Image: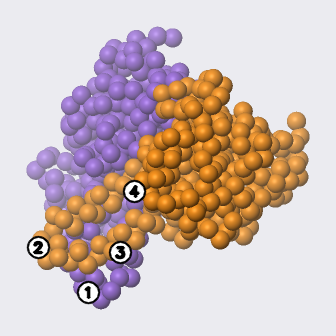
Chain colours: A purple, B orange
Amino acid sequence: MKVAVDAMGGDYAPDEIVLGALQAAKEYKDAGIEIVLVGDQAQITQALDRHGNWKAANITVHHASEVIDMHDSPGAAVRKKKDASVVVATGLVKQGLCDVVISAGSTGAAVAAALFGLGRIKGIERPAIATPIPNLTGTTVLLDSGANVDSKPKQLVQNAIMGAIYAEYVLNTPRPRVGLLNIGEEESKGNEQALSTFPLLQQLSTVNFIGNVEGRDIPKGTVDVVVCDGFVGNIVLKFGEGLAGAILQLVKEAVKNSGFWAKMASMLILPALKGLKKKLDYAEHGGAPLLGVNGGFIICHGSSRAKAIKNAIRVAKEFTEQEVVAHIRENIAKEEVVTNE
Amino acid sequence: MKVAVDAMGGDYAPDEIVLGALQAAKEYKDAGIEIVLVGDQAQITQALDRHGNWKAANITVHHASEVIDMHDSPGAAVRKKKDASVVVATGLVKQGLCDVVISAGSTGAAVAAALFGLGRIKGIERPAIATPIPNLTGTTVLLDSGANVDSKPKQLVQNAIMGAIYAEYVLNTPRPRVGLLNIGEEESKGNEQALSTFPLLQQLSTVNFIGNVEGRDIPKGTVDVVVCDGFVGNIVLKFGEGLAGAILQLVKEAVKNSGFWAKMASMLILPALKGLKKKLDYAEHGGAPLLGVNGGFIICHGSSRAKAIKNAIRVAKEFTEQEVVAHIRENIAKEEVVTNE
């Protein structure tokens, strides 16, 4: 299996991206993973050299002369910068030379590159970003987390179908519970979008729709797949990220500002707190797939470091092996509520 | 000052409501607060008697024979149950017999009772619930947190004006920073609602509009007033509530599951963790005002216990003394973007 990694995208590119690729090449050596680092050849080679002898690893470099940065307008940049790393990486999948793309660059550019380069799966109106969120008992997938705003009910229904597949095949959740994110459990609750989406979700045959869920159900872990508009999803995710960080900071300060013995005591529980941080760490979860395009595309957080990239490569491997794209194609075709015009 | 307390609303009514009122009567004795407990006279008197001699406290009981519960349809219930505790309490303010209402009952019923009983301030299209959220440095007010969905841009602008007044006069934040909750900082980001609201917010003269803010800005404390639709606001709040609870549970478990010495150690930092819980505790913040109606109306969490009610009475006092309603009336009249049709 070949993974095309956009080596130039992300706050710590190319160095941390390259390091993550090296770690993955080492860790998943026996899994038959080949990694293609896409971007400026000189910079990538330098970064590889800094991390020791990499010639034995299953890593190659594919040159791309341009980079799309956060200031570029995503759509325009993808059309104009034909030799941008994320565009070239996506092209490798399009041409069948690679199986899946990974990028920690601009999310907008990643979505645009995937749409232009791979195209949408038949029946899918808008691809969605599916973000795994750790909860008390496992993981909840939330989609869409920012690819689209003002989604139509039918598009939310497609999110439900795609999210259920991802939860089942990649996160190993049998018969995942799919909920519509809303402000109350009753069918009569919500905005126009939610009210119109609810009865459509009830008609699905491939999805275990459990009804409306509320914000608190996500951390509780009482739902496996949460369907929402990308406007709501993105706000919720960034709020959660900020809140988790703030609470951990408060815990540390509370411990620090307590007396001498408590300070001594805190040394003993530091390992426990670190374990907690790991549980909440997005890096552990390895990126969010863009679902609904004709090929694998894993979007990583802009602040991804090596570990996050390594884990994203693991996710990319599972995504490909589990044939997520084929399953989406199959289930979308099965659901009349989606295929009917 | 007279506070009308809906003694029958909330998961722990009437006992915890009555206890909270007694605590407030004691604690704010010298502040000239009189409390009128509204609801079933026999039940309230029994609850009062359980907590000792209350005759000296500035507490009276106003009988109301009906209760609106969570299963009632709010609008219909408020019209039909004319002797419901929340309706009667609101009537006391309408008649000028009390200054402000407090209710921990159904939020929908509270909003309906306030709308029917007190009416909207001139120029206000939709009253909004303003919820204070603790952050790393203080408090951020989020509105609307669930009174309305599918809000029009003009309604969000009114939220900005009202929220700024609340932050300035009740939370003592001079020149509060007001942000529009969105999925990116750039003016070009967002859904149709946000895109149309942004330029209107820029035209305000009474509001310090700092532009778009993201979910993570709320816990960081880089914004004092966050403006959003009640659909988004309600989801964010419930998610935050659930996440904070889940993280604290994980912290406790992490500590518990570590070794013997760590367990000993954790005894020493328990007070620090309790301090943290207090910081995050909604009960400390004492309810959320419904802004935009002709009178004071503080909505409490359904699971409010005595402490939350006591703090809500303190908030009700500040709300009244600071003449929040008059300030809203004044600033709404000043802003042409709101008064123009």
Name which residue lies at 51% across and 45% down: B44
**The numbered mark 2 sits on a residue in which chain?**
B
Are tags 3 and 2 found on a single chain?
yes
Residue B28, located in which quarter of the rendered image? bottom right
**The numbered mark 1 sits on a residue in which chain?**
A
**SS at circle 4:** helix
Farthest-out residue, bottom: A260
Dot 1 crowding, Cα within 10 Å, few <14, some 14–19, many 20+: few
- Badge number at residue B244: 4
Are tags 4 and 3 found on a single chain?
yes
Name which residue lies at 56% across and 59% down: B55
**SS at circle 2:** helix
Q: Position of residue A198 (x, y in %)?
A: 46, 22
Q: In the shown orientation, is residue A250 left or right of residue A229?
A: left
Q: Position of residue B242 (x, y in %)?
A: 39, 50
**SS at circle 1:** helix
Q: Which image quarter is the N terminus of chain B in? A: bottom right
Are tags 3 and 1 found on a single chain?
no
**The numbered mark 4 sits on a residue in which chain?**
B
Which sits earlier in the primary sequence, circle 4 or circle 2? 4
Cα gap from disc 3 to disc 2, whole angstroms? 20 Å
**SS at circle 3:** helix
Residue that numbered label 1 is attached to: A261
Which sits earlier in the primary sequence, circle 4 or circle 3? 4
Q: In the shown orientation, is residue B115 left or right of residue A93?
A: right
Q: Position of residue A10 (x, y in %)?
A: 44, 59
Indicate the amino acid at tag 1. Trp
Cα gap from disc 2 to disc 1, whole angstroms? 16 Å
Q: Is residue A49 above or below residue A312?
A: below
- Badge number at residue B260: 2
Indicate the amino acid at tag 2. Phe
**The numbered mark 3 sits on a residue in which chain?**
B
